[in-house]
Image (tube, rainbow, N blue to C red):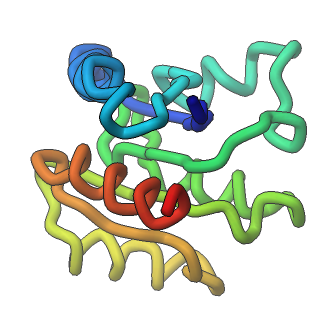
Amino acid sequence: MDLYSIFWIEDDEKIVEKIINNFSEDKEERGYTLMPHHYVCLDDFTENSKMELSSIVMELVCIDYNLPGGINGDVIIRKIRSYPANRTIPIIFYSFAKNEVELRDILLESLEHIENIYYAHQDDLEDRISYLIETWHS
């Protein structure tokens, strides 16, 4: 049984729980399950001195665009990509309020390299995670 570690930044814990529960229920059929690292916002993350972005083991990053405290997911993506070891990690950038084209445009304005970044409406997030992992798993 494979375990995929997801670095997940989302302010609505119910979204994360629902998706993780769905993957856990189907783990025997899928042959894998997910382990989320859940943080509410970047301030909470950076204030936790025990956690460093450069040392987190993650196969996939899921980041919501709209986060509390006036920070948005694109800021966190820039921070993650500032570490050389994290420049190729797949990222799913998603939102309930913005579509895939809008999310891509937001990143194009602030990030030079957007390789391995995928975009999704929040309603399609579980399918997008499944697609990426199924691609690696096969």
| Between 20 and 77, the one nearer to me in the picture | 20
| Between 88 and 22, the one nearer to me in the picture | 22
Q: Quarter of the image containing the N terminus?
A: top right
- For the point 38% across and 30% down, the residue is 10
- 86 left or right of 26? right
- Where residue 31 sits, quadrant-wise, is top left
Q: Position of residue 86 (x, y in %)?
A: 77, 59
- Where residue 104 sits, quadrant-wise, is bottom left
- For the point 37% across and 26% down, the residue is 28
- For the point 22% across and 72% down, the residue is 100
- For the point 49% across and 63% down, the residue is 138
Q: Position of residue 22 (x, y in %)?
A: 23, 24
Q: Position of residue 54 (x, y in %)?
A: 87, 43
- 110 left or right of 124? right
- 126 left or right of 137? left
| Between 136 and 104, the one nearer to me in the picture | 136
Q: Position of residue 50 (x, y in %)?
A: 87, 14
Q: Is residue 50 above or below residue 54?
A: above
